[in-house]
Image (tube, rainbow, N blue to C red):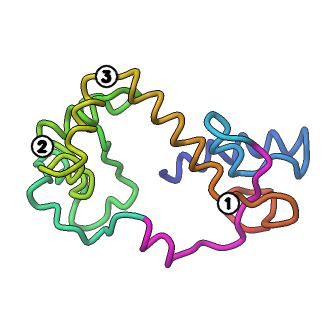
Amino acid sequence: MGFESFDVIDTIKSQLENMCPGVVSCADIVTVVAVRKSRRDSTIANLSAANSDLPSPALNLSGLITTSIKSNCPSAGGDGNLAPLDVTSPTSFDNAYFKNLLSKKGLLHSDQQLFNGGSTDFQVGAYSSDLGSFQIDFANAMVMMGNLSPLTGTSGQIRKNCMKVN
């Protein structure tokens, strides 16, 4: 999520704070389409969890990076540049991501591993040919993720500004 995304979230948050102070958290705004509300915002960022739960930025991408991606990511500067995970239809929520994996056009090495002669090849093939199945499974996964130990009640806080702790 780029900084401009936080601007949109903060605009929504500001309007909600004016109408209902201290009720809707930033986490609620981000997840409102997929999960239940009433979660709280964390007061810390967890570097250890991020490093263990997210793909490493040091993974070897040399076989996956194309000229067009390199031009979007210069060797100096460009920290705000974005590259879509789905180069075929980056503004649509569809199954082109999986079709790209079948064509060995995954942006991230860790993503391309989903279709690389392993046990998940079948699932990538199924999602690439059945948009409805992918959408149903994605919605169910988002609900499950949203229920993984959300902060509620007196845990955490409801931030006034989504980019900083109260």
Mark sitting earlier along the chain (3/2): 2
Badge 3 is on which residue?
130
1, 7: nearer the viewer = 1
Start and end of the magenta stretch? 37-53
Point out the frontmost of discs 1 and 2. Answer: 1
Label 1 sits on a secondary structure element that is: loop
Q: Amino acid at mark 1?
A: Ser
Image coordinates for residue 43, horizontal then vertical, percent? 72, 71
Badge 2: how crowded within 10 Å, few (<14), some, or many (20+)? some
Badge 1: how crowded within 10 Å, few (<14), some, or many (20+)? few
Q: Amino acid at mark 2?
A: Lys
Residue 105 vertical placement versus 61 (above, below): above
Badge 1 is on which residue?
149
Side of 127 relative to 100 (left or right): right
Q: Amino acid at mark 3?
A: Asp
Residue 57 vertical placement versus 3 (above, below): below
Identity of the residue drawn at 49% across and 78% down? 48
125, 60: nearer the viewer = 125
Quadrant in the picture for residue 132: top left
Mark sitting earlier along the chain (1/2): 2
**Quadrant of image for the C terminus:** bottom right
Contact (Cβ within 8 Å) of mark 1 with mark 2: no
In the rendered structure, find residue 104 and report the number of the disc placed on it. 2
